Image: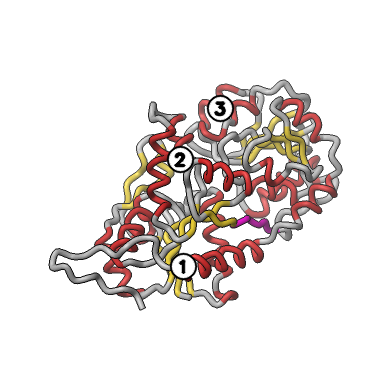
Amino acid sequence: MRLLLATDAWHPQVNGVVRSVERMAEAAAGLGVEPLMLTPADFASLPMPGYSEIRLSLVTRGRVLARWEQIAPTHVHIATEGPIGHAVRAACLARGQAFTTSYHTRFPEYLAARAPVPEAWSYAWLRRFHAAASGTMVSTPSLERELAGRGFTRLMRWTRGVDTDLFRPRGEDTGADLFPHLPRPIFLSVGRLAVEKNLAAFLALDLPGSKVVVGDGPDRARLQALAPDAHFLGALTGEALARVYAGADAFVFPSLTDTFGIVLLEALASGLPVAAFPVTGPLDVIGGTGAGALDTDLRAAALAALAIPRERCRAEALRYTWSESARQFYDNIATAHALGPMHRAARPPNGAALPRPG
């Protein structure tokens, strides 16, 4: 399999989409797959209005088709619905090439939080985007049910994983070493500081001890002004991030819009109990496991999480591996590709069909 893996989300962005796509590319060779990446690094780009950390690639169907002749992919997966995803989709339609997609982000909710755009309009556009795919991958059962109810078809499950060697429980002194002057318990939240992540709900909670926030984003200044007593550490990765997880007492995940939440697995792998709302993502990862507390009252969930044994959290995280995630991902692509394209190839003006890939 020579897989064209197209994504608008890529470094230097730090988010679950980048991490998931990167992990799939890393696992490809071991599964007999040659990944052919198409990312914003391949094109000129402009900063997204109001969110300069995200770059919008200047890409067209023609440029993708020209690249296609050079790399000759046998399979195509479109990870995002941005300019690159749209151009690759158009190229697939022109060639009559089967392709798969994945649904990572609740753009309708994100857009509605920033502009007066009805969610129904955005979902109609997304439904049309994914309808031409031979399969659309979703991360959880509850997201699959929700999208099916919105008219999305050919949905396929693709779970996520976590690096349990990096994210692991540390010594009992880890928290004292990291936060020597902070009152305990320490309630931690990790993620992009943007309005759709609902961090304000966490910062507004009346909790004992201290609140610690890891991450950066366009909403940071507003959130810091909202909660001057909270401790903002900025963006952390690798060992520095893993130590912060292990040194906290509870992980609070206030998002109402995430489709999974890889940070949930990172917290659990670190032995950190989770507090969250009972919504898609937390319901699927935490619900019924005893490794966290879900409640419409986030304060009650945060306090309840303090009583959860850390070893229970670690045991739950060990069920999620990136190797199993990759196996599922590539099996889905092979299965969907065997179905063939869900559309007809476009025809040039002379009426001759464009060549199909070999």
Q: Which residue is mark 3?
A: 223
The residue at the point 76 percent across, 32 percent down is: 181
Q: Which residues are magenta?
A: 158-163
The residue at the point 69 percent across, 35 percent down is: 276
In the rendering, which numbered label is found on residue 107? 2
Amino acid type of disc 2?
A: Phe
Mark 1–mark 2 distance (CA, rounded to whole Å):
28 Å
The residue at the point 78 percent across, 38 percent down is: 249
Give percent across and percent down for residue 252.
69, 35
**Nearest the eye: 294 or 188:** 294
Q: Residues within 10 Å of mark 3 (few under 14, many from 20)?
A: some
The residue at the point 83 percent across, 45 percent down is: 310
Mark closer to the chain start, 1 or 2: 2
Amino acid type of disc 1?
A: Leu
Mark 3–mark 2 distance (CA, rounded to whole Å):
22 Å
- With respect to residue 279, does 137 lie above or below? below
